[in-house]
Image (spheres, rainbow, N blue to C red):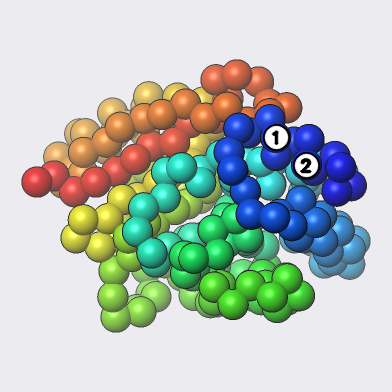
Amino acid sequence: MTARLQTALDELGQSFPAGTAEKLGVLVDELERWNRKVNLTAIRDKGEMITSHLLDSLVATPLLQGEVILDVGCGPGFPGLPLAIVQPGRQFTLLDSNNKKIMFAQHAAGLLGLDNVSAVKARGEDYAPGHGFDTVIARALAALPRLVEIAGHHVGEDGVFVALKGRYPTEELEELELLESPWCHAVTELNVPGLEKGSRHAVLLKRQP
């Protein structure tokens, strides 16, 4: 598993801390073990978990900015847990309203010794940390107009909202513009090893100056 993960990491073309493949292997093993008892994800195969959970999270690493990151609607911890593993100098808050998924994220963070992770059970609309975040990230949580309703207020003054999407979200972007949104956007294509080219994009949202 470690060798398989290392090969996959090499394909991303990024630089990762020593021991990354081993920690990701523990995360996948634990996710698969819990998933047999508690339904955390529809993905059952470990190989597919590597592609669709780990690599699909780690492609967002270069898009992060600042020191404090919020993963809203994290589910059982994606993309937050893989990102926290490879970015130990940043602080990650993982947010989800599903108790069993947050319990797994808390368990996995403890097991992996991730002292830069805090997992919180709450809805994005209701969460009140008392400060903004440098980066807010969300993966497959909601359409863009709804997404900024849920968590746009958590983005700090100069922060960025990274919305991880599948194919180019033309309709969602048009809907956002029709709302006369205060957000300006840029879209970048993400290449996830093992997934079809053009199947992943990130929308970067920043407040209009």
Residue 197 horizontal/vertical position (percent): 60, 19
In this figure, which residue is indicated by the disc labeled 2?
6
In this figure, which residue is indicated by the disc labeled 1?
10
Give above or below for 126 relative to 41.
below
- What amino acid is found at the position of numbered circle 2 in the picture? Gln
* The image quarter in which residue 106 lies: bottom right
Q: Is residue 23 left or right of residue 72?
A: right
Q: Is residue 171 left or right of residue 71?
A: left
Residue 52 horizontal/vertical position (percent): 70, 40
Seen at 66% across and 41% down, the residue is: 55
- Local packing at callout 2 (Cα closer than 10 Å; few below 14, some 14-19, many 20+) is some
- Local packing at callout 1 (Cα closer than 10 Å; few below 14, some 14-19, many 20+) is few
- Give the distance between the C-alpha atoms of the residues marked 1 and 2, in whole angstroms: 6 Å
Seen at 47% across and 65% down, the residue is: 90
- Residue 77 visible in image: yes
Give SS at disc 2: helix
Q: Is residue 174 left or right of residue 63?
A: left
Give above or below for 174 relative to 180.
above
Dot label at residue 139: none
Give SS at disc 1: helix
Give above or below for 66 relative to 123.
above
Residue 126 horizontal/vertical position (percent): 38, 75
Residue 193 horizontal/vertical position (percent): 68, 29
- What amino acid is found at the position of numbered circle 1 in the picture? Asp
Seen at 29% across and 69% down, the residue is: 132
Circles 1, 2 touching at the beta carbon (< 8 Å): yes
- Residue 150 visible in image: no
Give above or below for 166 relative to 148.
above
* The image quarter in which residue 178 lies: top left
The image shows a total of numbered marks equal to 2
Front position in the image: 71 or 145: 71
